[in-house]
Image (cartoon, grey):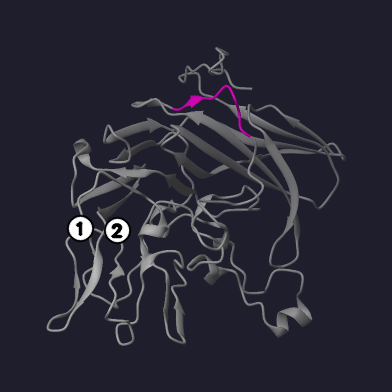
Amino acid sequence: MQFRNFTYFPRLQFKSLDEKKREFGVVVLRGTFEIHNGKALHLSQKQEPLVLADEYHGKIGESSLRLENNLAPYKLRTDIHVNAVAHAPGEKYLQQWEAGIKVGKIQKKILVTGPRQWRFNSVTGWELTVPRPCIEVPIRYEYAFGGIWEYEKEKKICEENPVGIGFSDKALSDTKHPIAAPQITSPENPVKEFGKSYKPEGFGSISSAWKPRLNFAGTYDERWKKFRSPYLPDDFKFEFYNSAHPGLIYPGFVRGDETVVLINMNPDSYLSFKLPDYSLSLLVRWEDGQMAPLPIMLDTIHIEVPGKKVYLTWRGIFPLVKPIRVLEARIKIPDSVKQTSSNGEDISNGR
């Protein structure tokens, strides 16, 4: 099969299987764009390669996911990932403030605080200290509710965020030492009670080994080993491949022309841009002479705020029921959209 890439983006092509062992083809295209505040995303002159392995903020298994790989065969909805630092408004030292993002019809906010702790008082019990004022906090799950709790021979893990802080057992916690409290919480449900479980909050990708993603992976038991291995379990669900925080999984796919607004995630407090109004598609030409267009969906938006870059991932699938002669990836840009790449190339007419 010959592949023709008529887009500006590096591509990846591979085969996959669904939970019913049916084979299908996958095409992934990843575009690199530059953020210019208040304007449409600008096509970067240097298109960075696809990501073939997850990248973490630190050691694997001990830190949160910074950049998800591009190997998912299919996503049911668009993921929105943000790697950023929460900046206090006006760059003033504050005990707490809100940060947020809005993309099209969805928006999400978090409450950010300075460092704080749970301390035990023999009269009143566990008390939360006043946050120490600060200017910025990395928006990572390491600063959200979660973690691993250990006391003597007891050990418990927060399955939704094992790298976080504040996860504890109230009845068995060591009262002699303070315990770090989460700095990233929900404005609607802030951390107030020691020993209570809270939903981890953040804007970043969620590891495939964490809940709620793990809930969709299916059952890998003795029955699976005997009757299904190495194929997907009968109860596998494709929701597994959506890796964004549940509050940043779009209801369906974005159109691709939405405005994105980021609040208190850079020194200027307000950052906005518009997604490029690109329409991508696959044209399949079979060996028997038939051909058909198939959609490619924008299913991942990864925003790197410190570097002022956005990585957009489009993904399309195609049937493998009969031999394909040529597979073409195409791009269409509306005439109303006038844009040039960083090297001055006019891309307004599409390819």
Of residues 164 and 29, which is closer to you in this image? 164
Q: Which three-letter amino acid code belongs to the residue tagged 2?
A: Gln
Q: Main secondary structure of the magenta part?
A: loop
Q: Is residue 97 magenta?
A: no
Residue found 38% across the figure and 56% down from its top: 247
Q: Secondary structure at mark 2?
A: loop
Q: Which mark is residue 131?
A: 1
Q: Earlier in the sequence, mark 1 or mark 2?
A: 1
Relative image position of residue 143 (x, y in whole percent): 36, 58
The extreme left residue here reads 123
Residue found 77% across the figure and 70% down from its top: 230
Relative image position of residue 161 (x, y in whole percent): 44, 66
**Is the residue 229 above or below the residue 43 in the image?**
below
Q: Local crowd at mark 2 within 10 Å, few (<14), some, or many (≥20)?
A: many
Q: Secondary structure at mark 1?
A: loop
Identify residue for label 2: 183
Q: Which mark is residue 38?
A: none
Q: Which three-letter amino acid code belongs to the residue tagged 1?
A: Pro
Please indicate whether residue 263 sits to the left or right of residue 279 in the image: left
Mark 1 vs mark 2, CA separation in Å: 9 Å
Please give the range of residues in magenta. 41-48
Of residues 341 and 328, which is closer to you in this image? 341
Residue found 59% across the figure and 41% down from its top: 314
Please indicate whether residue 101 sits to the left or right of residue 250 in the image: left
**Image marks 1 and 2: residues in contact by CB distance under 8 Å:** yes
